Image (tube, rainbow, N blue to C red):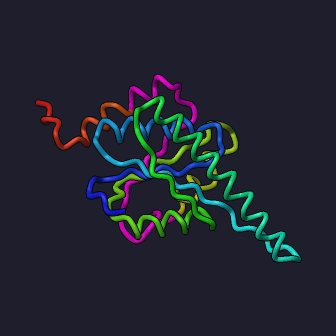
Amino acid sequence: MSDARFACLVVADESEEFPDALTYAGLLTKSAGWRLVMLRALEPADPAPWASITEEMRRQAQTAAESLTQRFAAEVWAECGVTIEPVIREGDVRPEIRRLLDEDPSIKLVVLAAAAGPGGPGPLVASLAKSQGLGNRPVPVLVVPGALTKDEVRALALPVGAALDPNTPPSA
């Protein structure tokens, strides 16, 4: 990942809230001139009695993840005009986020989706509230609430993205 521009990392999942977080990240990165990196972490396959079954389970999970990231990439391109840099990893999501942040120092912001129901914000967001962050270096985490409408997400993302753009003159 040699591009010198700053990057925003959005963590993909199959929740109904994720498309809003993706839209937010897409609008923000387009407005700021940043790159958009999307991480999809696959749960490690449980070892099956035969190696061929485990390998087939991994292959199917990888194929499904690739299909999902292609669908999200098409959606963010249509909505925001931004190209995603997909990263698919096998492993638990928090260590994979940490590893990606360590590998790519250009990532300056992490965007997560939060559920909007009585079950809480989701396991990743909830665990962040109880921990010391995601990695070895401080990176801000922005949580997009699932209760926002698409218009509210757009209205919030655009001014933030403009504020991050180094070519935008400061307001008086």
Q: Residue at x 75, y 67 (%)?
A: 45
Q: Is residue 148 above or below residue 34?
A: above
Q: Is residue 16 above or below residue 125?
A: above
Q: Position of residue 139 (x, y in %)?
A: 37, 59
Residue 96's quadrant in the figure?
Answer: bottom right
Q: Position of residue 100 (x, y in %)?
A: 46, 65
Q: Position of residue 32 (x, y in %)?
A: 28, 40
Q: Residue at x 71, y 58 (%)?
A: 61
- Residue at the right extreme of this rendering: 49
Residue 147 painted magenta: yes
**Looking at the rendering, in which quadrant would you find the C terminus?**
top left
> Is residue 54 rendered to the left or right of residue 84?
right
Q: Residue at x 67, y 58 (%)?
A: 62
Q: Is residue 99 above or below residue 83?
A: below
Q: Nearer the viewer, residue 167 or 83?
A: 83
Q: Nearer the viewer, residue 22 or 135?
A: 22
Picture mark count = 0
Q: Is residue 115 above or below residue 48?
A: above
Q: Which residues are magenta?
A: 131-156
> Is residue 44 rendered to the left or right of residue 164?
right
Residue 89 painted magenta: no
**Looking at the rendering, in which quadrant would you find the N terminus?**
bottom left
- Residue at the top extreme of this rendering: 151
Q: Position of residue 5 (x, y in %)?
A: 27, 53
Q: Nearer the viewer, residue 66 or 170?
A: 66
> Is residue 34 rendered to the left or right of residue 80?
left
Q: Residue at x 43, y 47 (%)?
A: 142
